[in-house]
């Protein structure tokens, strides 16, 4: 079980590293952009980073900030046509060099309408970060990844940063348990929320 315990230690180190190096001022801008977005919020990525982006879109929808997931390869196959003024794209790429996302950022930069490009990358000097309106850095030392390459600790760090953004968005919207229940009435979460707010509050 050596690898098992080493992964646990690496994960804890990655979270600590990401927390200590996070630029809070940049995170503040990302939170404000998510809250102020007057159009549609799109989250995108490829591979494991894409899964983190999809989960964040789902979590934001649960707190009433409607968000949509688009696979990073789909933008060049017609999804680019969905963009309109006021929309926001949040791209996730640990390397910041994912070809499809760099291409997307270039297309957004050429548009005449107001589409914001946000990113979460492990390299603030990467092409994706450089072409983003707001670029959150989330670097994880390679030695904390499995075999020095597989996205394990970095993926954990992505979720860690997204959790912090989500919690801040929820706090600023001053959400109550009843608010969340209206968006998430099903399953064990819905049952727990109903127990907290009472049937009368939930109905209102």
Image (spheres, helix red, strand yellow):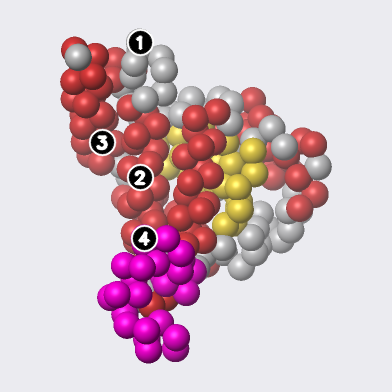
- State whether residue 174 appears in this view: no
Q: Residues within 10 Å of mark 2 (few under 14, many from 20)?
A: some
Q: Quick check: 66 above or below 8?
A: below
Dot 2 falls on a residue whose secondary structure is: helix
In primary-sequence order, the first of circles 4 and 1 is 1
In the rendered view of the protein, which quadrant contains the C terminus?
Answer: bottom left
| Whole-number angstrom distance, CA of label 3 to CA of label 1 | 18 Å
Q: Of tags 2 and 1, which is closer to the observer? A: 1
Residue 139 horizontal/vertical position (percent): 36, 30
Residue 157, quarter of the rendered image: top left
In primary-sequence order, the first of circles 3 and 4 is 3
Q: Residues within 10 Å of mark 3 (few under 14, many from 20)?
A: many
Label number found at residue 188 = 4
In primary-sequence order, the first of circles 2 and 1 is 1
Q: Pointer 3: what residue?
A: 15
Q: Pointer 1: what residue?
A: 147
Q: Of tags 2 and 4, which is closer to the observer? A: 4
| Magenta segment | 180-204
In primary-sequence order, the first of circles 3 and 1 is 3
């Amino acid at each position: 079980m050596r690898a098992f315990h080493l992964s646990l230690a690496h994960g804890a180190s990655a979270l600590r590293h990401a927390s200590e190096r996070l630029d809070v001022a940049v995170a503040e801008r990302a939170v404000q952009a998510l809250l102020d977005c007057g159009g549609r919020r799109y989250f995108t990525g490829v591979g494991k980073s894409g899964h983190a982006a999809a989960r964040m879109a789902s979590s934001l929808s649960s707190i009433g900030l409607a968000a949509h997931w688009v696979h990073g390869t789909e933008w060049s196959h017609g999804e680019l046509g969905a963009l309109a003024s006021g929309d926001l794209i949040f791209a996730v790429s640990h390397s910041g060099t994912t070809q499809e996302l760099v291409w997307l950022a270039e297309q957004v930069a050429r548009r005449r309408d107001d589409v914001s490009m946000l990113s979460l990358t492990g390299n603030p000097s990467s092409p994706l970060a450089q072409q983003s309106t707001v670029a959150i850095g989330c670097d994880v030392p390679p030695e904390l990844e499995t075999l020095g390459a597989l996205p394990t600790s970095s993926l954990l760090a992505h979720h860690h940063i997204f959790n912090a953004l989500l919690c801040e968005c929820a706090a600023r919207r001053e959400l109550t348990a009843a608010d969340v229940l209206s968006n998430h009435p099903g399953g064990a979460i819905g049952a727990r929320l109903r127990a907290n707010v009472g049937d009368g509050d939930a109905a209102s």
